Amino acid sequence: MIVLTLTENSIKKNLKVIEKNISYIDLLELRVDLLKKSEIKKLDSFPKLVDLPVILTYRKVEDGGEFSGSDISRAKLFEELQYSGYKYFDLEAGFYPRIKNSDLTIIRSTHNFLQKPDNLEDIIIKANSCGEIPKVAYSVNSFGELLDFYSTMKRLSDYKKIVLAMGEFGLSTRILSKKIGSEFTYSSCNSKLKSLGHIEPNILCDVYNYKNISKRTSIYGIIGNPIYHSKSPELHNSFIKSKNRDAVYVPFLVDDLQSFIKLVEFLDIKGFSVTVPFKKDVVSYLDWKSEGVEHIGACNTVKVHNKKLFGYNTDAFGFINQLNEVVNLKDKKVAVIGAGGAANSIVFALKREGAIVTIFNRTLENAKVLANRNGCKFESLSNIRNFNNFDIVVQTTVAGMGRLKKINPVKDYKFSGKEICYDIVYSPLKTKFLKKAVRSGAKVLYGDRMLKEQALEQFKIFEY
Ligand code: NAP
């Protein structure tokens, strides 16, 4: 069930947030400590204003909230509100107001913003024995700690609990809450809570199809560092939805590949995409490699079957499809700008189609290594001003993307206007390089289709 944590400072503003998210959520958590003092008198009527069960929480500063008063006044508030229609009271360990209403369920919560609590198993077992629901939220500071979180929760699978891993490594625990036996997952619309791993309810439902996830749902994902900017979860989960498959595709921020490989077995992950910086390192874990992976030495797709890892590279798939639609590549002169991971796959694919490739790169040595592996020419990027006879110019560097969007790495090339110019950067779509190419009259191709097609190809691999 999805809890929406209400973080506005007035009931009126919170009601607006509820109205906006009503189709996504199952429960509300009203945070008294975030409300203005003048709103406290309205707490008695709040449950009657909303059509959902409400958790009442009054969080102290040391537990991550904003209340800095005494426990006596906090206890008084809970005691006074126990017959007002709240379904749950969230009370921290050691805090015992006199609650007599047996219709109320106590969520016994523990928050640790540094690490796993030492006595985590005791906390969960004790609350269960008292008829309370334990809520344990703690920060995981590495992928190794996340692996430990999942294995601890597996050991505690017979107990009722609400559990989540806070921090940037912990996002998957909010999406996979049902897989780890957590009664609720917490969401909010407050961007300040994102650092704790909070996620918006519409993202949980619209992107991750949360409501359809069950213990049987197959897990797929993408690993990288950074990873949360990736468009792959949106693409893959939309394929999953359109094919009506019982699966979910989750982003995993990884700082230690070996721990992730252990998690693959542990969570029975059926397949995963691989992005920067793991495309090369993952190869040593593969039990089988496609021809592309063998040649390129990099893998962006791993399918798991009978505990064995099968590696593929779909990076250049959409790139070649799109190009083949507009030109026969045999004997065409192609300039590839860049010699990084993407260029690796692209040069391999272009050579397979019979193109004559010259690699231009900022660091000559990297261009040389790639050129020697594929039997093509190479040049320093600064020499590109001396060339003007290419049929196709392919831009594969990070220059032009995101914070480098003002850079055109091909600014010195003298276009004839007859070239086909292709930039694989997809954010922004219209890079400085392509804008200049358009002005010269050249035909241009954008990077978004390549992204979509390589993901579709991954999806086909995952399906079998
Ligand atoms: P990468 O392995 O890190 O390679 C980076 C390349 O960019 C290297 O050739 C590097 O040259 C060059 N470079 C970096 N800064 C530069 C600068 N200021 N001026 C000129 N060259 C510079 O990255 P990648 O994985 O190949 O990804 C490259 C780009 O392709 C990214 O923008 C990525 O989003 C995009 N991409 C798109 C798709 C798609 O489906 N559309 C798929 C994969 C990648 P040095 O060797 O000199 O460092």
Image: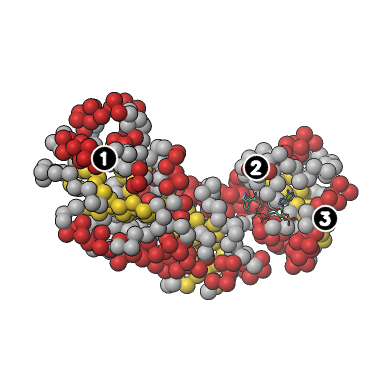
Q: Residue at position x 30%, y 52% from top?
A: 110
Which residue is most to the bottom?
A: 287
Mark 2 burial class by Cα count in 10 Å: few <14, some 14-19, many 20+: few
Instruction: Decide if residue 159 is on the left or right side of residue 445.
Output: left
Q: Nearer the viewer, residue 202 or 58?
A: 58
Ranked by sequence position, the earlier of labels 2 and 1 is 1
Q: CA distance from mark 3 to mark 2?
A: 24 Å
Residue position marked by numbered label 1 in the rendering: 70
Contact (Cβ within 8 Å) of mark 2 with mark 1:
no
Q: Residue at position x 42%, y 47% from top?
A: 196
Ranked by sequence position, the earlier of labels 1 and 3 is 1
Q: CA distance from mark 1 to mark 3?
A: 69 Å
Q: Residue at position x 55%, y 59% from top?
A: 274
Q: Nearer the viewer, residue 429 or 175?
A: 175
Query: For numbered disc 3, what is the local secondary structure?
Result: strand
Q: Residue at position x 71%, y 39% from top?
A: 406
Which callout, 1 or 3, points to the residue nearer the camera? 1
Query: For numbered disc 1, what is the local secondary structure?
Result: loop
Q: CA distance from mark 2 to mark 1?
A: 48 Å
Residue position marked by numbered label 3 in the rendering: 380
Mark 1 burial class by Cα count in 10 Å: few <14, some 14-19, many 20+: few
Q: Position of residue 284 (x, y in %)?
A: 57, 72
- Asked if the beta carbon under badge 2 is closer than 8 A to the nearest atom of ligand 1, the reply is no
- Asked if the beta carbon under badge 1 is closer than 8 A to the nearest atom of ligand 1, the reply is no
